[in-house]
Image (tube, grey):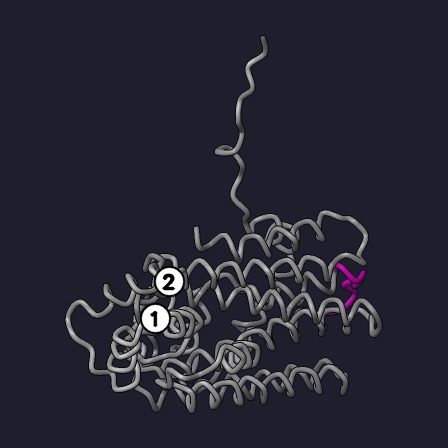
């Protein structure tokens, strides 16, 4: 009688490596463009910018731009897709520098944040420098349509930051408002990064719409997982301290779900800890216990899988290829980080 051997435990975990490998030449050019565009006679600017941008990270957003361009048949006879990918990375980096000042964050990608090393003023001003560099790159590409997409994304990100600020520490924040925040703060740049990849390849119809949808849903899934990991991850995964959102009084989906599902005494705990920031020893552990009791982390991750499925579906109109398979695996990677 034949013995059936389960391969369940032997499946290879989803990875960004296939996508990085297929886009390696483009991303090497992006890295060179980043270094070139960070140059300035004011020594503090490249020093501080390189602390963040040069630290690497996954570079998912610029990777989406070059991958989307290639998926749409971009021939690569010029460097416009490289400039757009660099632009996207600079927009992202600028928002990180500003975010860390607003959030008083001490860590970024596992290292001391720029504001912790150089102070708030320098971080804000170098963030402004990166924003201006990004707009120079948009102009260099020479497309008003692309300039429109990326400039609107930049303003939407700022609106998302302000919306998060005004809803911060408000435990009555509905899930719809939270989703509006993460769509603006995070997903909009994912969407724009993928959309301009299609545009630079000359695809302005169904492919452009599909890639914008792909980026938007991937970005939502990515942020949902990040918000779950803040309570249920490892510091090495996040590159920041576990519980930062809790300590800062940020209203994320796990908190919203636990608050709505909790008893009166539990809601009083959330109001004390989040609304007034009257936090005591053991409060983070208690918060994590309440999140577990009400399935808030599990349901946040289930929503992430839902948006991940929509991202995968958005690529359905593209023919099968190694690049499409790698993009689909990138969706799985974004979600499986929680495991």
Badge 2 is on which residue? 294
Q: Position of residue 2 (x, y in %)?
A: 59, 11
Q: Position of residue 328 (x, y in %)?
A: 65, 53
Q: Is residue 182 magenta?
A: no
What is the span of residues highlighted in magenta in the rendered image?
A: 71-79
Residue in front for this viewpoint, 275 or 294: 294
Q: Is residue 239 visible?
A: yes
Q: Along the horizontal axis of the image, is 21 left or right of 46?
A: right
Q: Position of residue 40 (x, y in %)?
A: 48, 84
Label 1: which secondary element:
loop
Residue in front for this viewpoint, 322 or 23: 322
Residue in front for this viewpoint, 241 or 113: 241
Whether 51 is drawn above or below 135: the answer is above
- Mark 2 residue crowding within 10 angstroms, few (<14) / some (14–19) / many (20+): some
Label 2: which secondary element:
loop
Badge 1 is on which residue? 262
Residue 231: which quarter of the image? bottom left
Give the residue at x 80% y 67%.
207
Q: Along the horizontal axis of the image, is 65 left or right of 78?
A: left
Give the residue at x 72% y 47%.
322
Mark 1 touches mark 2? (CB < 8 Å): yes
Give the residue at x 24% y 65%.
286
Residue 183: which quarter of the image? bottom right
* Chain-order first, disc 1 or disc 2: 1
């Amino acid at each position: 009688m034949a013995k059936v051997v389960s391969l369940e435990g032997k499946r290879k975990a989803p990875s960004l490596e296939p996508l990085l490998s297929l886009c390696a030449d483009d991303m090497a050019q992006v890295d060179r463009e980043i270094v070139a565009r960070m140059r300035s006679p004011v020594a503090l600017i490249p020093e501080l910018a390189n602390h963040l941008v040069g630290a690497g990270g996954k570079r998912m957003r610029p990777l989406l731009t070059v991958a989307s361009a290639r998926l749409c048949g971009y021939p690569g006879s010029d460097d416009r897709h490289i400039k757009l990918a660099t632009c996207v990375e600079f927009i992202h980096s600028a928002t990180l520098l500003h975010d860390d000042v607003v959030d008083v964050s001490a860590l970024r990608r596992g290292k001391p944040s720029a504001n912790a090393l150089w102070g708030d003023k320098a971080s804000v001003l170098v963030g402004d420098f990166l924003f201006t560099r990004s707009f120079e790159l948009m102009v260099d590409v020479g497309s008003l349509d692309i300039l429109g997409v990326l400039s609107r994304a930049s303003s939407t990100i700022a609106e998302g930051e302000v919306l998060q600020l005004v809803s911060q520490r408000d435990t009555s924040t509905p899930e719809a408002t939270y989703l509006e925040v993460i769509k603006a703060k995070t997903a909009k740049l994912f969407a724009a990064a993928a959309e301009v990849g299609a545009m630079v390849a000359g695809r302005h119809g169904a492919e452009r719409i599909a890639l914008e949808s792909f980026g938007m849903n991937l970005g939502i899934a990515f942020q949902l997982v990040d918000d779950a990991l803040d309570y249920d991850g490892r510091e090495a995964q996040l590159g920041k301290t576990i519980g930062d959102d809790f300590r800062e009084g940020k209203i994320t989906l796990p908190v919203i779900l636990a608050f709505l599902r909790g008893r009166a005494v539990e809601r009083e705990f959330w109001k004390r800890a989040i609304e007034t920031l009257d936090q005591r020893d053991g409060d983070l552990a208690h918060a994590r216990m309440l999140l577990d009791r009400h399935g808030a982390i599990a349901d946040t991750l289930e929503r992430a899988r839902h948006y991940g499925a929509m991202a995968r579906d958005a690529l359905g109109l593209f023919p099968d290829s190694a690049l499409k398979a790698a993009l689909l695996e990138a969706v799985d990677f974004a979600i499986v980080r929680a495991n």
